[in-house]
Image: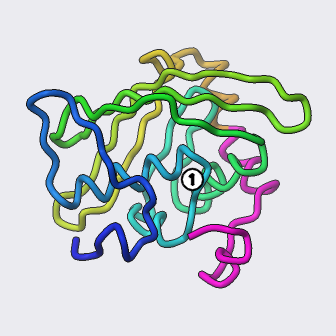
C-alpha cells in the first residue's frame, strides 16, 4: 500500500514493539491508524485502510461491513468524554498482527471511568494492504454464548442508526477529525 501515515493524518506514529518484533511500513500504518481509532480519532481517510467487507469484533459488537464498523469508531466520540491510552505493545508482527492495548475511558454524562485491557488482533490482505478483520478481546477473550452473541449482533445494527458517519472529508474535518 503506497499511502503513508502522514497522508492519512495518522497521529500515532511511535509504535512500540516487543523485543524481536518488527513491522514493515504498511503494518506500522495499520497499527498507527488502529491506535488512533481506539483513541476516538476516526476519519474517513483512516477507515479507507479497511476493506469494505471487513469485520470488527469486540465483546459488545460484531460489525460486518463498512456500514456497521464505521459507526462503531465514530461512536466512541459520542460515548466517552475522555479516552486515554495507558499502554500499547505490538507482540506479533505477522498476519495477523497482535497487540496489547490498555485504555482508560470516561463515560459522558455520568463520569464513570473504565479501564480495558485488550488483546488486539489485526488481520489484513497482503495484496491490498487493507484490514479485513479486527478482534478486540477484552482481557484476552471474546464472548462465546448464544445470548451474548445475539446482543453483539443487535448492537452492530442499532449503533449505525444512532451514530452519523461523515460522507465527505470536509464533513469529517468539521467534526474535528483527520
| Residue 29 vertical position relative to residue 92 in the rendered view, above or below | below
Residue at 49% across / 44% down in the picture? 56
Q: Is residue 81 left or right of residue 59?
A: right
Tell me the element at label 1: helix
Q: Who is closer to the viewer here, 85 or 137?
A: 85
| Residue 163 vertical position relative to residue 152 in the rendered view, above or below | below
Relative image position of residue 52 (x, y in whole percent): 45, 65
Q: Is residue 1 left or right of residue 71?
A: left
Badge 1 crowding class, 10 Å Cα cut-off, few under 14, some 14 to 19, many 20 or more, is: many
Q: Kindly identify which residue carries mark 1.
A: 69
Q: Is residue 118 left or right of residue 173?
A: left
Residue at 69% across / 66% down in the picture? 165
Q: Is residue 136 left or right of residue 81?
A: left
Give the residue furthest to the right.
109
159 within the magenta span: yes
Relative image position of residue 155 (x, y in whole percent): 71, 39
The segment highlighted magenta reads 154-178
Relative image position of residue 142 (x, y in whole percent): 49, 22
116 within the magenta span: no
Q: Quadrant of the C terminus?
A: bottom right
| Residue 122 vertical position relative to residue 130 in the rendered view, above or below | above
Asked which quadrant contains residue 123, the reply is: top left
| Residue 41 vertical position relative to residue 127 in the rendered view, above or below | above
Amino acid at each position: 500500500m503506497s499511502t503513508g501515515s502522514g497522508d492519512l493524518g495518522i497521529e500515532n506514529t511511535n509504535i512500540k514493539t516487543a523485543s524481536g518484533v518488527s513491522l514493515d511500513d504498511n503494518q506500522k500504518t495499520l497499527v498507527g491508524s488502529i491506535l488512533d481509532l481506539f483513541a476516538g480519532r476516526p476519519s474517513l481517510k483512516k477507515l479507507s485502510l479497511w476493506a469494505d467487507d471487513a469485520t470488527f469484533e469486540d465483546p459488545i459488537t460484531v460489525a460486518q461491513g463498512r456500514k456497521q464498523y464505521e459507526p462503531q469508531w465514530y461512536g466512541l466520540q459520542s460515548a466517552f468524554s475522555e479516552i486515554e491510552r495507558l499502554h500499547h505493545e505490538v507482540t506479533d508482527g505477522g498476519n495477523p498482527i497482535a497487540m496489547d492495548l490498555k485504555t482508560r475511558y470516561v463515560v459522558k454524562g455520568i463520569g464513570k471511568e473504565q479501564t480495558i485491557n485488550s488483546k488486539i488482533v489485526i488481520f489484513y490482505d497482503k495484496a491490498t494492504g487493507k484490514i479485513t478483520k479486527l478482534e478486540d478481546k477484552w482481557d484476552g477473550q471474546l464472548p462465546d454464548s448464544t445470548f451474548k452473541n445475539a446482543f453483539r449482533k443487535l448492537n452492530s445494527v442499532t449503533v449505525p442508526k444512532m451514530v452519523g458517519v461523515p460522507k465527505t472529508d470536509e464533513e469529517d474535518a468539521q467534526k474535528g477529525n483527520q
